[in-house]
Amino acid sequence: MINRISFMGKVTSPDFEASAQKARLKPMENDCFVKSTEPKKEQPDNEFIKWAGENRFLEGGLQAALSEENLLGQGFSHSVYKIPNNDDFVLRVSRNYFDSKRTDYSQYKITDTEDKKLKGNFGQEVAILETDSPNDPRISVLKKQNGISNGNPPPSAIHYENGDLREGELPYEAIERKEHYAKCLQILADTPEEAYDSLIDKFDALNNAGYRFDYYNANNFLLDEDKGTIEIIDTDKMSDKYDNDLGNALWALTNIEYLNTYIMPSYNPDEPKVSDDDKNLAIKNTLTIIDKYTKAMQKKGKKFTSEGYEFTVHLMGSFPMMIFLQSNDHYAQVEKLREMGLMD
């Protein structure tokens, strides 16, 4: 049989046309897309919680982290531990009521407490680890800051309430503490003025988000010598708006309460002595810190208040501040600060 030639240039036959017609009428069976009815599992936007889940932190990492070898430091009421294989967060737990060996870690759960309104790293809490039992300690997960602890903690942080020195703590007047104090003053004196400008901005960020800085411990400033920055840790959520006292913050930054301990001779005759040159350098560096800090306040339009007890009594009554304000009379000092635009 001779096949017909179509005007479209195709060869056709009765069998071919029948097969094509059948294919056109047959419903499509493949390449169909059916919407899934299973709910999509949302990923947590909290970076620590996401990391903890991926690394099964609660199942084994938590207990391992809270060991003596991971202890970073201790304040008046809390101990801070590093987290192995995680350089972004640390753990904080009560110092007085925590015994790692007696704690049951199997019931701990994670709760997201991150405040998205607080922009920046202030060592703030991002999550808590806790159980339903009031006997198990509440463990905070904090953002990690880098740097060395500024100055020395107050005596209350290294002594028990009865006056005895806590285990593992150096005496307040130990030469190691004096050397660390002098080193921090030198770092702060060498820190560029831009870091002080940034520090004032950081207090603004804390104020706007309603966080109070714990200025009672000079250690709550961290000095990042490599980056040339002054960092803040240990803050507490207060309200939607809070005004941190910049005078009290300067009192902490200078660690002025330790100056007399540094200058005064040790009661131990075998203790190494601080030279007169080093004493004078400590005073000089303190003056430089005050100068850079107050210049940053002037640049940012900030002022001291008369409400900060540590500032008005202890810092303004100190020898370096008397030199800086060229008077040992409190009222004359206040007037000088007004002339500088630093007080109303």
Image: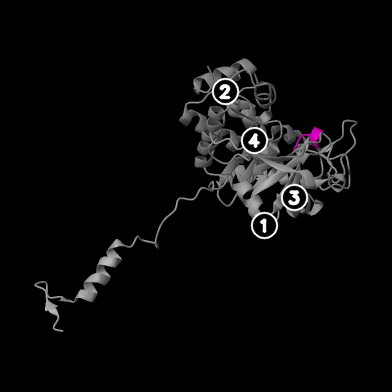
From the top left corner, tell me how far across and down residue 112 is, in percent. Answer: 63, 39
Q: How would you rate the neighbour count of disc 2 (Cα within 10 Å): few for under 14, some for 14-19, many for 20 or more?
A: many
Q: Which residue is mark 2?
A: 304
- Which residue position holds label 3? 62
Crowding at dot 3, Cα within 10 Å, few <14 / some 14-19 / many 20+, comes out as many
Say left or right for 178 vs 188: right
Mark linked to residue 85: 1
The mark lying in front, picked from 3 and 1, is 3
Name the residue located 61 percent from the left edge and 35 percent from the top edge: 287
Say which of marks 2 and 1 sits in front. 1
The kind of residue on which mark 2 rests is Phe
Which mark sits nearer the N-terminus, 3 or 1? 3
Discs 3, 1 touching: Cβ within 8 Å: no
In three-dimensional space, the C-alpha distance between marks 2 and 1, rounded to whole angstroms, equals 43 Å
Who's the residue at 54% across and 48% down the image?
A: 38
- Can residue 151 be seen in the rendering of this structure? no
Tag 4 and tag 1, C-beta contact below 8 Å: no
Is the residue under label 2 in contact with that under label 4 (CB below 8 Å)? no
Q: Is there CB contact under 8 Å for labels 2 and 3? A: no
Mark 4 and mark 1: span between their CA atoms? 31 Å
The secondary structure that dominates the magenta segment is helix
Mark 2 and mark 3 lie on one chain; the one further toward the N terminus is 3
